[in-house]
Image: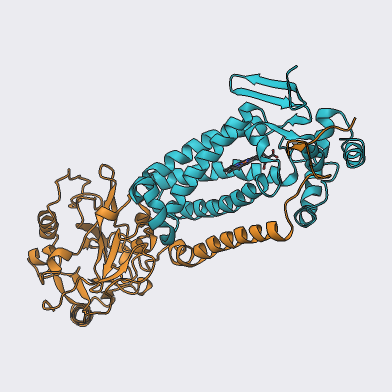
Amino acid sequence: MSEEKTLQTKAISAHPGSVPGRHMQREVEVCKMIDATTCIGCKACEVACVEWNDLPFGETTFDNTYQTMTQTRWNYWNLIKFNEHKRADGTLMWLMRKDQCMHCADPGCLRACPADGAIVQYENGIVDFQQENCIGCQLCLSGCPFDIPRFNPTTKKVYKCSLCSDRVGQGLEPACIKSCPTGCLHFGTKAEMKDLAEARAKQLRDVSGFENAGVYDPDSVNGTHVIYVLHDATNPEAYGGLPKTPRIPFVYTLWKPILKPLSLFTVFAGVLGMFFHYVSYGPRRTVPPPRKDEHGNDTQRPAR
Amino acid sequence: MATTHNVQRVEAEHTSFGRTTVYEGELLRHSAYTRVVHWLVALTFLLALLSGFALFSPWLYAWIAPIFGSGARARLLHPWFGIAFAIAVLFQVRGWAYQMRWQPKDREWVKHAKDYATKTDEPEPEYVGKFNGGQKIWFWVMAWSAVIFLVTGVFLWFPEILSRTAMWICYFFHDLMGLIMLGGFFIHLYEGTSGIPGTLRGMLHGTVTRAWAWTHHPAWYREVTGRDPIRDREQDGGQLSR
Ligand code: HEM
């Protein structure tokens, strides 16, 4: 896949009209596959992410788990969530999930964004924030079903995982993939990764006794460009709050793109109506109409 | 008394907010204080409206946002314009709430709103006081809009106070209120200027003509002059006045 230039823009936030340059090249969709069943929680991907993206260090927090901090931050885009899970037989197991932007095919952040060009989606599936166009309104936070975008109050900009679009554009794999020692992270085309994930899930079901093993690639956002293999795909919530059916709020799917422009149009139609009211019915003038004095000014005297 | 073009100065309002001179044939409609507050409300509202509508739709962003420097600047300023608007409205409500209280005759007025819009050559019914039902509705819509804008705006400004879900709910109601106020503002602008000639001067200089008052607000005319609006209107229509 590395021969293709994969950074042709597919969608631009708050951009009136079509996307310049679309459909000019053959494009493949990229995908990161995370096999949660072979993750050992070593955090090499966390470090690689901070290093490659040159993110300034922040304090880690200790909350009696192995987790580096409670959630991702504007300067920490990739966090392994550690969850202690009780099996049916009462024994414990780790569920470890690398949490980061899912690069949805239908990105709620991009739908919510009011700033032209602050969020772009490339033909290859990567959803990228362009901080120079970001206005700091944080609506993307409420559009994202995965609670990913993070606000930096100092710069008043929002940040998140870019799927290393700078590396991918040069034919390299993302930094996290590069650093993974167990091979639980894979990167390739969406079709390849989907096949690989399905094969692994089948293996887990047939050989390892995880009868609910499956692939997480939710349809409710038209699939994602980060997919998981889970021991129990029927219960993604157990992996640190991965939503079973991620949903973009209706205000960003129905109100903002359709009903809102219609309402605005209605208001302006009303203004036009008012103008024609003026033309056809005329203003409400005084009764009787004002008289002019010798200077041509209106006079209105009380009757005496 | 000074005489200008045969018109006599009969009354003057004098406060630290300014003065209003009322000549013969005119009536004091809005005091200087009321006028200052109204135009502060209008100014802050328009700034908030414009910076808000910059972020309202992709089709407005590219040409409204640059008025404020950039989208980021419009977003930065908008909440502060909103707070200024809410404060101005507070003063407006303090001054007008009593006169704007809803009365049974205002229901009558709303029922006659269609005639009001179409029979533009007829004077208002005798019961119409200082503010008609439509004006009272606009006043209360404005007052409540300030509350709704403020509450929903604070959670959009500081989403961490509540939740991401609260944020999109607030976004929706903030939008809705913006649309209602945009439409209301256009109606108000029309009625205050071309729709009813002689009204704007009341909010600029403070006075209106007597004929304006007996035509559009007969009960108020009776209240401030002690005269019968209908008789005066009919007599003026005859030969009595010059
Ligand atoms: C910039 C354009 C505006 C113009 C030309 C204008 C004009 C006027 C005039 C002439 C009056 C007096 C009506 C009367 O004496 O009966 C008035 C009253 C009033 N104005 Fe405005 N106004 C403007 C903007 C606004 C805005 C933006 C608001 C609030 C958001 C507002 C709120 C009110 C209210 C509540 C009243 C009293 C009720 C009424 O007369 O409707 N005005 N305005």
Residue at image coords 52%, 33%: B87
- Residue at (79, 44) in percent of width and height: A286
Q: Where residue B209 sits: x, y (%)?
A: 76, 35
- Is any atom of residue A182 visible in this view? yes
Report the quarter where the N terminus of chain A lies: bottom left
Q: Nearer the viewer, residue B88 or A74?
A: B88
Is A121 displayed left or right of B154 in the figure?
left
In the image, residue B33 lies at what x, y percent?
Answer: 61, 27
Give the x, y percent position of residue B28.
72, 29
Residue A239: where, in percent of width, then height? 27, 62
Q: Is residue A231 visible?
A: no
Nearer to the camera, B3 or A89? B3
Task: Using residue A268 as the reference point, say whether residue B123 is left or right of it.
Answer: right
A162, A117: nearer the viewer: A117
Q: Which chain is cyan?
A: B
Image quarter for ligand 1: top right
Q: Quadrant of the C terminus of chain A?
A: top right
Q: Is residue B236 left or right of residue B171?
A: right
Indicate how the structure is coloured in the image.
Answer: by chain
Colour chosen for chain A:
orange
Q: Residue at x 34, y 47 (%)?
A: B69
* As drawn, B18 above or below B126: above
Residue plotted at (77% across, 36% down):
A294
